[in-house]
Image (cartoon, rainbow, N blue to C red):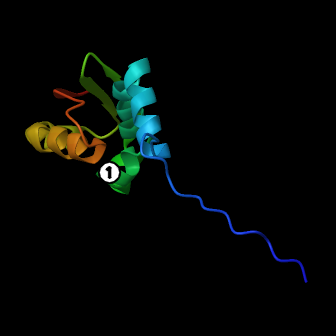
């Protein structure tokens, strides 16, 4: 039977983990903010829930403001009253202060 030689795969002192390398790469390209904006839009249903996502027709971010097109006027009114909570929830989900305001259309 063939025995494989043992290899020592210890990390060198000056090496980075893959996660740290990706973080550094995102910082160098200055794409971290755009990545987090995209994360919010892609995970809208997961963050806000299915009932709200089903009534959302369009969603986009411009100048740290999230524009949300809703098909339900009562839902728009209800969410408009809790704007601060929505912004806080979305920023918490992204892990950073990505949004400053939410505008319901």
Q: Is residue 27 visible?
A: yes
Q: Residues within 10 Å of mark 1 (few under 14, many from 20)?
A: some
Percent x, y of residue 23: 40, 35
Answer with the quarter of the image where residue 61 lies. Answer: top left
Q: Is residue 37 above or below residue 52?
A: above
Q: Is residue 48 above or below residue 60?
A: below
Answer with the quarter of the image where residue 75 lies. Answer: top left
Residue drawn at (31%, 31%), measured in percent from left and top?
A: 68
Left or right: 7 in relation to 50: right
Q: Is residue 104 above or below residue 48?
A: above
Percent x, y of residue 55: 37, 44
Percent x, y of residue 21: 46, 37
Q: Is residue 29 above or below residue 101?
A: above
- Residue lying farthest to the right in this orientation: 1
Assign the C terminus to one quadrant of the image.
top left
Left or right: 105 in relation to 45: left
Residue on which the image places disc 1: 47
Residue drawn at (48%, 47%), measured in percent from left and top?
A: 12
Q: Is residue 60 visible?
A: no
């Amino acid at each position: 039977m063939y025995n494989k030689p043992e290899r020592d795969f210890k990390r060198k002192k000056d090496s980075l983990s893959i996660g740290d390398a990706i973080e550094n790469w995102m910082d160098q390209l200055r794409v971290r903010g755009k990545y987090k904006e995209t994360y919010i839009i892609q995970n809208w249903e997961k963050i806000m829930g299915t009932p709200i996502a089903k009534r959302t027709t369009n969603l986009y971010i411009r100048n740290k403001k999230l524009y949300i097109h809703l098909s339900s006027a009562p839902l728009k009114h209800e969410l408009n009253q809790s704007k601060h909570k929505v912004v806080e929830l979305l920023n918490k989900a992204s892990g950073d202060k990505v949004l400053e305001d939410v505008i319901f259309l």
